[in-house]
Image (tube, rainbow, N blue to C red):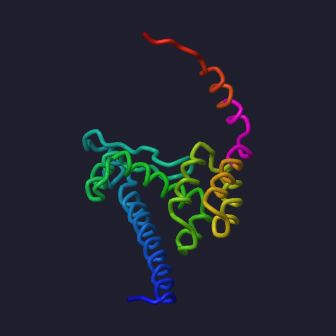
Amino acid sequence: DLDVKATLAAAEETLAARRAAEVDDLLLVCQWADLHAADPRRSPDGHRAWCGQDRLVEIGGDGTPLVQELCLPELAIARRTHTLSTRAVLADALDLRHRLPRTWAILLAGDCEPWVARRVASASRRLDRHQIRIVDAAVADAITGESPGRVLELAAAKVIEADPAAHAARLQAELRRRYVGCGR
């Protein structure tokens, strides 16, 4: 029984609530990573302790904190997702928080779609902590006013601009990979 005005207001409220819920999810994933950032093979006094085979691993890109590897299945169970899906969310969240701080701030404010920010984080993961600044600056300026497709195209272009040698190497590898084959 909503009129036109109330329907549009409800649509805006729903969008804000959905974005806030997705941001809350990313914040919880980051909190989980923070709680599992200590080396599990060391006791609190710094001596090596035996705690099974758990170890610190790099989930995100260069410059993100290490996380205990065996904490991922626990989080995946709580989120009711596959471990690889949970690992991808954690990598994106850590990249956004530690490597793309301007984009992270816009995301926390609810001014962009979380899935777009996550795709940017994923696309720029190969860059080091210095090269990523080019991507963060460009995306932060565009993510609130441009369409998702334009933002992702811009991010891809900035990844190439930040590391043209790696892009050229990927192109050469792709050219070498092409072949024609016949089956039975």
Q: Residue furthest top?
A: 184
Horizontal and vertical percent for residue 42? 33, 47
Q: Foreground: 183 or 23?
A: 183
Please indicate whether residue 85 sits to the left or right of residue 93 in the image. Answer: left
- Image side of residue 49 versus residue 114, left or right: left
Q: In terms of image quadrants, where is residue 120?
A: bottom right
Q: Write the residue at 45% across / 12% down.
A: 183
On screen, 97 above or below 14?
above
Q: How many marks?
A: 0
Residue at the image position 46 percent from the left and 68 percent from the top: 23
Main SS, magenta residues: helix
Where residue 27 sits: x, y (%)?
A: 43, 66
Q: Is residue 95 left or right of residue 150?
A: left
In the foreground, 15 or 57: 15
| Magenta segment | 159-169
**Where residue 64 sits in the image (x, y, percent)?**
52, 52
Q: Assess whether residue 161 is covered by the magenta stretch.
A: yes
Q: Residue at x 68, y 26 (%)?
A: 172
Quadrant of image for the C terminus: top left
User: Which residue is drawn at the image coordinates 28% and 44% (left, top)?
Assistant: 49
